[in-house]
Image: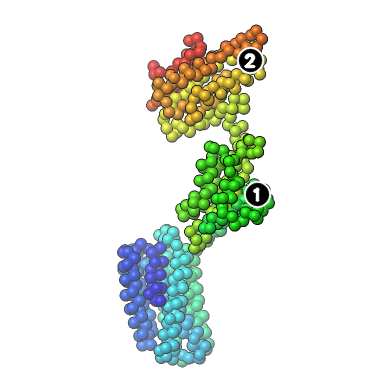
């Protein structure tokens, strides 16, 4: 038991000091130390003060041999164990002396009783070492390095406490039993240990309190966040990830008791069967699978969320967001998962209205610029197409604004047809459009410009009035000299102006002059 306490202690001290050797060396030295102290313990009746002083020296030397660090820190750490051994032993002996009315020397003369009290001593020592290990975490080693004055004061306090307990043990060994004296010695020893722990608190306490407050605050925030999500949810589902069964299910505020205990995957499939939008089906099925939740739990990932669409009875799709919270229980590899579903259709509509042009359905000017800048920040590739609709004013003036709106919508649809889905397509003015192709070569630039011009060339009529629109296009490819939105826009706009001056219905590619 003493060996276990010593090994626990050394593992704790590894959080404060850098060991010179590996774990096997620590265990070997612990074993030698334990045997030495046990043998010295048998000499206590002869000279308590000498034996305690020698034990103290052995533990200090042990720390000096096994660990790196400055002398004061190693002294402070080395005094921890002998201080506990002496204080606990004096407390046990004085307490037991009060119970049976015997002196210190009488108890030592009773071999069986003395051995039993030593077992109690080692058990309490082990508990103290475990407690210190729980409190003193590796992160506090930096505190010791940053505050050497705190450590120096703590070492002085320990030295005074050790000297005091050695004096108490000497007094106990030479005096006959006295109730008042035993009570005083017990209280003094207890206060000595209390002062030791107060010293730890004064050395590390502010950091310990800060850590505890942070953890408490984090737990409170997690609970508040969870409650807020549940209140706004349309579905709340709790899952046992070990058994893959449903623990609770609430749909629009109504508990679904009939599904409690059902196999999770079967129940979810029944709810979403043939309703998932094809674009999000794979993401939904992956992120709501128990296997994925288990993997997140094993990696320490507690939260994640994702968006998906479900089809309504009228055939339309509604956007939802799933929040998944994983709570891993002690002794369990998986724990529980809480799935909270929100209807985010309104938020999506607001987002669309803020980022798109209401008439064409394309990105608006600001969003187009932001998306292009975002791409250029990651990759220096692509080409910018500036497209101006020729004769659009004549459509508005002669065929009416309703026809003008129809033309804008048709142009937007045709541009989506010409350019791939990875392209950024936006309306940046009344009759002006912008397309950014992220990955393109010179041949493709010409092909896309020709296709756009041919497809946009259209005649619209109303009664006897006919107006033909076409497209003037300016293109600039990303290069070493032209690699920001501003320089691309300026170059492509100049190329567009050249197409206009050259007779419209054509494209011009920017070249270096």
Contact flag, marks 2 and 1 (Cβ < 8 Å): no
Q: Residues within 10 Å of mark 2 (few under 14, many from 20)?
A: some
The furthest residue to the right: 254
**Which residue is drawn at the image coordinates 44% and 91% (left, top)?**
106
Determine whether 64 is above or below 345 in the image.
below
Image coordinates of residue 294 in percent, x first then y, are 49, 53
**Which residue is drawn at the image coordinates 47% and 17% (left, top)?**
450
Between marks 2 and 1 in the image, the one whose residue lies nearer the viewer: 1
Res 443 → quadrant: top left
Image coordinates of residue 178 in percent, x first then y, are 50, 90
Image coordinates of residue 120 in percent, x first then y, are 45, 80
Q: 2 or 164, which lies in front? A: 2
* The label number, if any, that marks residue 409 in the structure image: none
Q: 336 or 367, which lies in front? A: 336
Q: How many marks?
A: 2
Q: Is residue 299 left or right of residue 234?
A: left
Image coordinates of residue 70 in percent, x first then y, are 35, 63
Q: 196 or 349, which lies in front? A: 349
Numbered disc 1: secondary structure? strand
Q: Is residue 21 visible?
A: yes
Q: Is residue 394 visible?
A: no
Name the residue tied to disc 2.
396
Name the residue tied to disc 1.
251
Q: Residues within 10 Å of mark 1 (few under 14, many from 20)?
A: few
The furthest residue to the top: 464
Q: CA distance from mark 2 to mark 1?
A: 51 Å
Mark 2 / mark 1, whichever is N-terminal = 1
Determine whether 91 is above or below 428 in the image.
below
**Which residue is drawn at the image coordinates 62% and 54% (left, top)?**
259
């Amino acid at each position: 038991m003493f060996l276990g306490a010593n090994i626990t202690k050394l593992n704790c001290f590894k959080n404060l000091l850098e060991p010179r050797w590996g774990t096997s060396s620590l265990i070997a030295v612990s074993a030698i130390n334990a045997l030495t102290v046990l043998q010295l313990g048998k000499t206590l009746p002869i000279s308590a003060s000498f034996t305690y002083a020698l034990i103290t020296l052995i533990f200090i030397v042990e720390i000096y041999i096994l660990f790196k660090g400055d002398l004061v820190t190693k002294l402070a750490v080395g005094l921890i164990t002998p201080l506990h051994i002496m204080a606990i032993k004096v407390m046990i002996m004085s307490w037991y002396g009060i119970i049976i009315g015997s002196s210190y020397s009488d108890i030592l003369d009773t071999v069986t009783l003395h051995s039993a009290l030593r077992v109690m001593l080692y058990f309490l020592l082990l508990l103290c070492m475990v407690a210190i290990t729980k409190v003193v975490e590796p992160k506090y080693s930096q505190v010791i390095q940053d505050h050497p004055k705190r450590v120096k004061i703590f070492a002085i306090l320990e030295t005074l406490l050790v000297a005091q307990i050695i004096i108490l043990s000497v007094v106990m060994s030479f005096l006959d039993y006295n109730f008042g004296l035993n009570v005083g010695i017990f209280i003094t020893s207890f206060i000595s240990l209390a002062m030791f722990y107060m010293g730890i608190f004064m050395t590390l306490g502010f950091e310990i309190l800060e850590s505890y407050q942070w953890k408490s605050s984090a737990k409170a925030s997690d609970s508040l966040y969870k409650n807020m999500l549940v209140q706004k949810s349309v579905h709340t589902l709790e899952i046992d990830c070990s058994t893959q069964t449903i623990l609770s299910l609430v749909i629009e505020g109504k508990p679904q008791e009939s599904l409690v205990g059902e196999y999770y995957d079967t129940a979810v499939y029944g709810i979403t069967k043939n309703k998932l939008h094809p674009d999000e089906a794979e993401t939904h099925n992956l992120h709501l699978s128990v296997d994925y939740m288990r993997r997140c739990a094993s990696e320490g990932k507690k939260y994640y969320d994702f968006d998906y669409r479900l089809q309504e009875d009228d055939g339309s799709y509604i956007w939802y967001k799933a929040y998944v919270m994983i709570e891993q229980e002690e002794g369990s590899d998986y724990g529980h998962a809480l799935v909270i579903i929100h209807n985010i259709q309104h938020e999506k509509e607001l987002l669309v209205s803020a980022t798109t042009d209401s008439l064409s359905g394309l990105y608006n000017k600001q969003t187009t610029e932001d998306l292009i800048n975002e791409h250029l920040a990651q990759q220096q590739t692509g080409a910018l197409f500036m497209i101006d609709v020729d004769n659009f004013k004549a459509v508005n003036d002669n065929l009416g604004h309703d026809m003008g709106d129809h033309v804008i919508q048709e142009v937007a649809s045709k541009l989506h047809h010409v350019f791939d889905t990875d392209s950024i397509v936006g309306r940046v003015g009344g009759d002006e459009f912008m397309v950014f192709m992220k990955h393109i070569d010179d041949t493709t630039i010409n092909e896309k410009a020709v296709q756009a011009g041919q497809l946009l060339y259209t005649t619209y009529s109303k009664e006897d009035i006919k107006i033909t629109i076409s497209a003037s296009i300016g293109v600039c490819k990303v290069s070493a000299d032209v690699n920001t939105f501003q320089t691309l826009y300026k170059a492509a706009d100049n190329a567009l102006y050249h197409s206009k001056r050259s007779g419209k219905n054509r494209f011009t590619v920017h070249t270096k002059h």
